[in-house]
Image (tube, helix red, strand yellow):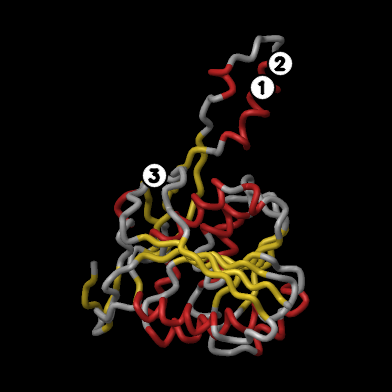
């Protein structure tokens, strides 16, 4: 949805009304939202069995399958101008969070980078499984203090080493400044970051720069195809830029790209629409 406010277009995430939330005193427009989820069984079965054995009780198959529920608490804005949409949670972030939960064999003990992290929900979920999370965004508005507050709220969930840094698609000097933190990254995440063609162009140039450096990297991009805020359909251009990427540095990189089926298990409660897509892009250095 969108509304005219102070002569600037403001937008609200399509999933804003799906979750329980409360206003934050002293912060106009800010809300604290509860993103409830069911823990993957591999995170809880051992814990449940240990408790049963400690009480000297038999462990049945039913006991092993007992569901444990959790919640990620996220401070976000109820509406923002387009330049600050990262201060809200969008559906792609939840799809990527589900994918992380569903594939511990990919993420366990990995060192990952999230681009355009926004309020940090996906990185918080990743931090429950991976070894290190480098959380990045452009230094605009209150995004960095917001990320820090959200990680503090969810400190009981966070198991990984976490770093919050600026990485600006339009200023690759910020990549150089983070070279030490980036040197062991093998997985890159991005969710709902494409909403105009100019940003898409900058994103893929940044991806090219990052994936041209060792070690070999895999990028997962979750996106919702939509007629976005400028009412220009950007997904076609997104696909065009994937093809552009595949043609770059081919003497030094073997590129592999594929659209990942999204019929994996859902751990967060939201509508998984047919417009959600997940792309996997891998770079193997020659």
Q: Is residue 111 above or below residue 72?
A: below
Residue 269's label in the rendered image is: 3
Query: Quarter holding the C terminus?
Result: bottom right
Task: Name the residue at 29% across, 71% down.
Answer: 11
Q: Is residue 195 left or right of residue 127?
A: left
Q: Secondary structure at mark 3?
A: loop
Q: Is residue 83 above or below residue 257?
A: below
Foreground of the two, 41 or 17: 41
Report whether 192 appears left or right of 254. left
Question: Going 62% across and 29% down the picture, which residue do you hit?
Answer: 45
Q: Secondary structure at mark 2?
A: helix
Mark sitting on residue 139: none
Where residue 220 sits in the image (x, y, percent)?
54, 64
Residue ID for mark 2: 53
Q: Nearer the viewer, residue 259 or 226?
A: 259
Which image quadrant: the N terminus? bottom left
Q: Quadrant of residue 248?
A: bottom right
Q: Residues within 10 Å of mark 1 (few under 14, many from 20)?
A: some
Residue furthest top in the image: 57
Percent of width and height locating residue 31: 40, 57
Front one among 256 and 194: 256
Distance between mark 1 and mark 2 Cα atoms? 6 Å
Q: Is residue 262 above or below residue 238?
A: above
Q: Quadrant of residue 10?
A: bottom left
Which x, y percent locates residue 136?
60, 72
Pointer 3 local density, CA inside 10 Å: few below 14, some 14–19, many at least 20:
some
Question: Whole-Å distance between the Cαs marked 1 and 3?
Answer: 26 Å
């Amino acid at each position: 949805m969108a509304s005219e406010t102070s002569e600037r277009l403001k937008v609200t995430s399509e999933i804003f009304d799906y979750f329980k939330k409360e206003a934050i005193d002293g912060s106009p427009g800010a809300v604290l939202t509860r993103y409830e989820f069911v823990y993957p069984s591999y995170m809880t079965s051992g814990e449940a069995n240990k408790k049963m054995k400690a009480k000297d009780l038999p462990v049945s198959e039913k006991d092993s399958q007992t569901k444990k529920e959790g919640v990620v608490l996220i401070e976000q804005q109820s509406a923002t101008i387009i330049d600050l949409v990262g201060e809200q949670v969008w559906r792609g972030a939840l799809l990527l969070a589900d994918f992380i939960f569903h594939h511990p064999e990919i993420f366990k003990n990995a060192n990952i980078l999230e681009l355009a992290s926004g309020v940090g929900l996906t990185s918080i979920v990743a931090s429950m499984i991976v070894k290190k999370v480098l959380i990045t965004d452009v230094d605009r508005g209150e995004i960095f203090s917001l990320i820090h507050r959200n990680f503090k709220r969810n400190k009981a969930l966070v198991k990984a080493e976490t770093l919050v840094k600026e990485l600006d698609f339009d200023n690759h000097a910020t990549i150089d400044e983070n070279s030490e933190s980036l040197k062991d990254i093998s997985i890159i995440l991005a969710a709902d970051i494409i909403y105009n063609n100019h940003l898409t162009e900058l994103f893929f140039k940044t991806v090219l720069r990052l994936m041209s450096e060792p070690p070999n990297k895999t990028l997962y991009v979750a996106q919702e195809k939509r007629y976005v805020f400028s009412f220009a359909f950007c997904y076609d251009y997104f696909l065009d830029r994937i093809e552009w990427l595949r043609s770059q540095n081919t003497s030094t990189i073997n590129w592999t790209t594929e659209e990942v089926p999204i019929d994996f298990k859902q751990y967060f409660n939201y509508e998984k629409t047919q417009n959600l897509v997940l792309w996997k892009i891998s770079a193997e250095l020659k």
